[in-house]
Amino acid sequence: MQCRVIIQRYIESALNGAALSGRSYFQKLFYDFRHREAYCFKAILAITILGIII
C-alpha cells in the first residue's frame, strides 16, 4: 500500500475520531498505525503531533 493512501486514511480516521473523543484518539490511532508501515512513520508522527497540538 502506498504511503499516501495510508496517510489519507489516517487523517480521515483521526478527524472522525478526534471530533468524538479528542486528543487521546490521536495517540491510540498513532499506535495502531505505527507498526503498519514503517516508512510512513515520520509523516504519521508529524500528523499526530499536529493533531495533539491542535
Image (cartoon, rainbow, N blue to C red):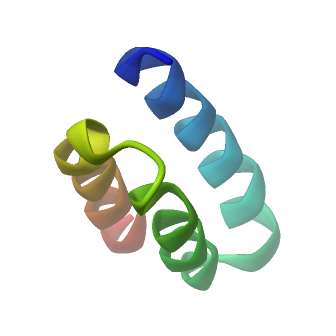
> Which sits in the foreground, 23 or 34?
34
Which residue is painted at 58% across and 77% down in the image? Answer: 28
> Which sits in the foreground, 30 or 15?
30
The quadrant in which the C terminus is found is bottom left
Residue 29, placed above or below residue 25: above
Please give the count of numbered marks on the rendered protein.
0
| Residue found farthest to the right | 20
Residue 13, placed above or below residue 32: above
Which residue is painted at 39% across and 72% down in the image? Answer: 52
x then y, percent, for residue 8: 53, 25
x then y, percent, for residue 17: 74, 61
Is residue 35 toward the left or the right of residue 17 in the image? Answer: left
Which residue is painted at 17% across and 48% down in the image? Answer: 42
| Residue found farthest to the bottom | 24
> Which sits in the foreground, 23 or 5?
5
Which residue is painted at 50% across and 55% down in the image? Answer: 33
x then y, percent, for residue 31: 48, 72
Q: Quadrant of residue 22?
A: bottom right
Is residue 2 toward the left or the right of residue 15 in the image? Answer: left
| Residue found farthest to the left | 42
Is residue 4 toward the left or the right of residue 39 in the image? Answer: right
